[in-house]
Image: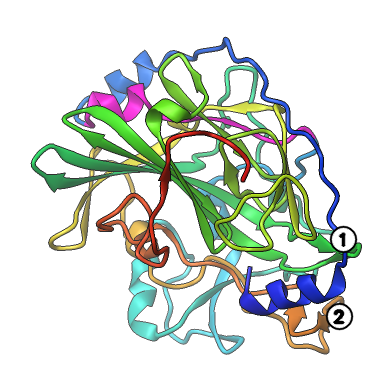
């Protein structure tokens, strides 16, 4: 969410109503022995303590196949296809676009296509928590030295449906990367980061809900922001999670997703900013792509576009994992200061 949307919501809304947030009980724990066998060189604790994810009961835009997403895109700068770009685009050549400049992966149908293309909706996890025929996540292990290891769990969606303010929707975009990060010391989890729009929240490992030893993450309906509790989350003020307000996310215990069952895994060297796949057959050029994973913001006069108080219905796509401060010093990214790691899991 941009600062101007914050201003708009504060001006447009004059009252906030409170609502209770219930905390459900969890008893399910999914095994991942097959994953450990297939990716035997990744540190075992990165999989043992990997988050389990609940999507909202009313979610319409599910996790998406990363490779499949790229097949629907054209590389553009200023709405012009990049001359001489690799064709077709694949996960094995995506980083070749970095030298071209500020590239937007632009959907062939267009972000404002009516009806929306079916690939926007992604793949709903099956009963085991797997997104079948869709590799929809990436696990990146960043060894910081002296036993300190940050493990990033990235979740990918082909479409993000923005929040509504006074019934008006803002902030839809193609491509969506969100993440958890767990900080380990000597293989023991210490704290977690939950990304939420332009900010997020950090908690101690002991504070968060778990299924067995695996932390629970709730994904907000449409926007895919990550939260530690189910319920309503006002994020009008970035990093401040309130139980109600003018700019709300909604989470619940819907479909269970286990991202470890369909994932790419990488080691990240903070000193050289380089990535090494644990499985040599894993495509890796895409993880180095520095451009945007969705369409550029539409012009104000484009079909279906509107702009109110500087906020647009259709906005530009996000950058990918390489731009998420993987070498961060704190649990929070460097853009969040001070970094507060809360010892209690509450909606504040």
Q: Is residue 236 above or below residue 150?
A: below
Instruction: Measure the alpha-carbon separation of dots 1 and 2.
Output: 33 Å
Q: Position of residue 323 (x, y in %)?
A: 38, 65
Which residue is painted at 38% across and 70% down in the image? 290
Residue 129 lies left or right of residue 232; in this view the side is left
Q: Quadrant of residue 306?
A: bottom right
Which residue is painted at 46% across and 87% down in the image? 83
Read off the residue under disc 1: 15
Closest to the observer, 274 or 326 = 326
Read off the residue under disc 2: 303
Residue 281 lies left or right of residue 323; in this view the side is left
What is the magenta range? 42-57
Which residue is painted at 56% across and 12% down in the image? 28
User: Which numbered disc flags the more N-terminal residue, 1 or 2?
Assistant: 1
Q: Position of residue 138 (x, y in %)?
A: 40, 44
Taking the magenta stretch, the answer to whether it contains residue 90 is no
């Amino acid at each position: 969410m941009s600062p101007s949307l914050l201003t708009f919501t504060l001006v447009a809304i004059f009252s906030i109503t409170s609502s209770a947030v219930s905390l459900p009980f969890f008893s399910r724990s999914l095994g991942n022995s097959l994953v450990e066998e297939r990716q035997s060189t990744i540190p075992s604790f990165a999989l043992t303590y990997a988050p389990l994810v609940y999507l909202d009961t009313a979610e319409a835009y599910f996790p998406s196949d990363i490779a499949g997403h790229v097949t629907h895109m054209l590389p553009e700068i200023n709405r012009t296809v990049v001359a001489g770009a690799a064709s077709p685009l694949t996960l094995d050549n995506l980083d070749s676009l970095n030298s071209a400049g500020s590239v937007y992966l632009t959907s062939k149908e267009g972000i404002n296509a009516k009806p929306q293309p079916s690939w926007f909706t992604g793949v709903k996890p099956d009963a085991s928590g797997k997104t079948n025929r869709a590799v929809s996540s990436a696990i990146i292990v960043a060894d910081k030295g002296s036993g300190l290891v940050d493990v990033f769990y990235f979740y990918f969606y082909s479409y993000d449906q923005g929040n509504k303010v006074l019934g008006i929707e803002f902030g839809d975009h193609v491509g969506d990367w969100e993440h958890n990060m767990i900080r380990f010391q000597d293989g023991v989890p210490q704290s977690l980061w939950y990304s939420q729009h332009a900010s997020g929240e950090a908690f101690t490992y002991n504070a968060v809900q778990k299924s067995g030893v695996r932390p629970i993450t709730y994904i907000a309906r449409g926007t895919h922001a990550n939260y530690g509790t189910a319920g309503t989350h006002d994020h009008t003020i970035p990093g401040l999670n309130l139980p109600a307000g003018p700019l709300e996310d909604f989470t619940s215990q819907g479909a269970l997703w286990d991202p470890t069952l369909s994932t790419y895994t990488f080691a990240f060297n903070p000193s050289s900013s380089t990535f090494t796949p644990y499985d040599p057959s894993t495509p890796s050029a895409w993880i180095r792509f520095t451009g945007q994973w969705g369409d550029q913001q539409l012009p104000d006069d484009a079909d279906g576009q509107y702009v109110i108080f500087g906020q647009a219905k259709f906005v530009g796509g996000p950058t990918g994992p390489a731009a998420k401060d993987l070498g961060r010093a704190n649990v929070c990214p460097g853009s969040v200061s001070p970094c507060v790691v809360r010892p209690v899991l509450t909606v504040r």
